[in-house]
Amino acid sequence: MQLTRGLKKSFKWLSGSLIIILFFLQGTGLINIALLTNLEGNAADLRMISTLKGGVDERIVIVDIDEKSLTKYGQWPWNRHYLAELVDTLFQHYQIKVLGFDLVFAEPAGNQFSALEKEFKTRTDVSPQAKQALAFEALQDAEFAKIISQYPITLGIFFNQTETSQLNQLPPAISQLDSATNTALSLPKPVGYTANLELFNNASSRSGFFDNPVVDRDGKFRRVPLFQSYQGQLFPSLALSVAQQALDNPELDIQMVQQGEYLAITSIQLGHRVVNTDQGGAVQIPFRGGEGSFPYISVADILSHKTPLEQLEGKIILLGTSAPGLLDLRSTPVDESMPGVEVHANIIAGILDQNIPQQPAYLIAVQSLGYLILGLFLLITPHFLSPLKTLALSVVLIISSLVVNFSLWQQGLMFPLATPILLIISFFIFHMSWGFFIESRHKRAITRLFGQYVPPQLVKEMAKQPEQITLDGQSKELTVLFADVRNFTNISEAISPKELTLLMNQILTPMTEAIYRNMGTVDKYMGDAVMAFWGAPVEQLDHATKAILSALGMQKKIRVLSEHLQIKGHPEIAIGIGINTGIMSVGNMGSKYRMAYSVMGDPVNLGSRLEGLTKVYGARIIVSETCQQQAPEFLYRMLDKVRVKGKKEPIRILEPLARLQKCQFDDIRKATLLNDAIENYCQRDWLLALDKLDNIEQYKDEDYLKIVYLYRQRIKEFQQTPPPEDWDCVFTFTEK
């Protein structure tokens, strides 16, 4: 017994020391615990939101390419003549101070007409009016460049951290770093870029990048670097370049300190102004408030001279867009969809006011040492205190941390807030949990019992709110998923039963992991298939989103597994997934011998049918329209309007490709072309549909080959035998 007590005591001290070590390493930056990092970001957001300045800053005005402007002047990109007129109007009529473009002009205005121009030169049957129109297009860039050269304008640059493509020539850098300095500085170092046409670079004396390579893991814009180093050439951000121009171009000086082998940037100096940065030259965005903290004026109102002179005279102007269709909306702590141009405006205002928060160079040393001392204090002290006094001590320490942190924040210093508070809470929970270790055995036995029905993550949620959980039958909106291994019969015939069992375990394990990671419940395994659902027993408002994320995760895991297995001589492994959202019956079902928490109903059957259709359309995942409506944050490609066996009403089926924020332009372009082609097909516009299918084929994407071939065949048949007048563009399946 004495030995057992000693082992328990040793284990307690060892466990407590492990907590201290983890927080210490987090403080030094040697490890990055995602939970702590995310909580720290959320805490910083709350701290900032609670101290927002608010109001509207009239010094910086956003000239907005909004829906009103797009309606009047057409879709982007516009005729450069309009842009030249806009710039001239801003400076001549409204007498603005400086202008920054949150845009890049990478292609000639008449690029789309170059083939026509070559053809027209050799033809005699072309009217003088047509040739004149082409000549006008060629003159647009020259006209725009001439206008740019006359005024204080900053052009935009886009750097790429992953793609090595280089479009046009970069403008002159503000500085050339030697190899040693470039290596020692922890600046973003892009590998590709998109720059403006050379004649525009020559016309403007200033440029600045508008991309942000330091977006946080949760996708939020909290920091923006003021510099990036491309092949040792130092380029400023758009916000920094515009601010410098607005301040009459004071000398720019980067303040650095040596930290071992590395150079840490502490701040930059613009004349007498000091701008605080982190060690990598990035600034915390000093948000004034949510969207609308700066005046927005439509391009249409400016070109029509509807805007009063006093709104723009002597102001700093940023030309950007708030139109959702132009994809420049950013997630920020103060607004989930803030136009990117307003992020630049906040930084410019922060530079002008010198109110950008600072993370001191000594931050790492202070926080790591602080976590060590605080952790040791919290590990030792509660041994001498009652549970109530331990609770009181924890509350006092948390309040003290909040007071000190907010005081430092008011002085412009950023110190961690969530991490020390979580350290205090962790030790309180640690001591309380240890005290009730023996008493909790019964509870753990109950947890294991319920774990037979639902995944461990959901068991934990049920334990937090048991009064809200019921295993009784109920009807509610859920999302169900079916995943099935393709060509399983051929695979099973090629290997022994023992190998088959091992293979199925290898396949079903990562599929289940993807479901559990997104808080899903595995309903059952059916040979080579798995069925899961979301929305019960724990309420999940985003059940459709979680199901799609699980499906995308499954496909990724299975692709990796398949490549590994093929090396060992196994055939290629692929799965098809069907997902549906609807009103289903859910509850504890079975007999007195065995019970299972399961779902049933028509929407469940439809989910199974959708999985079967993946083979028909060459899709990895098929979702119903109801599921797509519940999860609009993904990029989808339309597949068809179908009537499955056993259903009278037709449904739209789609394939989710990825989260919109992670999609490249080509991904969106291909999906849009397919969606438009199917729309043309439904309108009986066979030729236009075929033209768009041709455009899709030019991408040579194997994922689109089967669907393109399917619609080509249908169109060919309809061209020979047109559909009836009452055709509803629905394909009816007579088999499951």
Image (cartoon, helix red, strand yellow):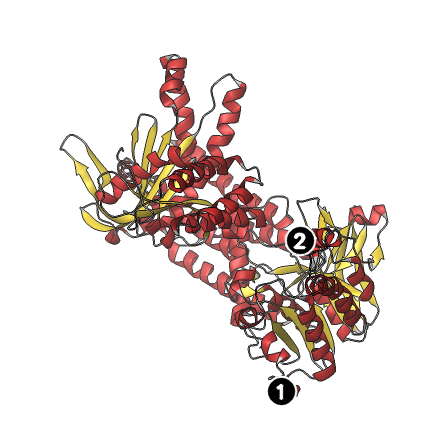
Q: Is residue 350 visible?
A: no
Q: In the rendered structure, which amino acid carries the disc numbered 2?
A: Ile
Q: Mark 1 Cα within 10 Å, few/some/many (few <14, many 20+)?
A: few
Residue where numbered disc 1 is placed: 308
Q: Which residue is painted at 58% across and 54% down in the image?
A: 216
Task: Using the image, determine if residue 653 lies above or below residue 155.
Answer: above
> In the figure, 144 relative to 304: above or below?
above
Q: CA distance from mark 2 to mark 1?
A: 51 Å
In the image: residue 311, left or right of residue 721 = right
Relative image position of residue 239 (x, y in whole percent): 70, 66
Q: Are marks 2 and 1 in contact (CB under 8 Å)?
A: no
- Residue 485, given in percent of the width and then of the height, sits at 38, 28
Of tags 2 and 1, the one toward the viewer is: 1
| Of residues 232 and 72, the one drawn nearer to the viewer in this rendering | 72
Give the left or right position of residue 522, taking residue 85 as reference.
left
Q: Looking at the image, is 202 positioned above or below residue 488?
A: below
Extreme residue toward the front, this view: 125
Residue 620 image label = none
Residue visible at 44% across and 46% down? 686
| Residue 410 seen in this snapshot | yes
Mark 2 residue element: helix
Q: Is residue 341 left or right of residue 335?
A: right
Tag 2 residue: 364
Farthest residue toward the top?
496
Q: Position of residue 207 (x, y in %)?
A: 76, 63
In the rendered image, residue 453, in percent from the top left (x then y), is placed at: 27, 37
The residue depicted at 44 percent of the width and 29 percent of the height is 574
Secondary structure found at label 1: loop
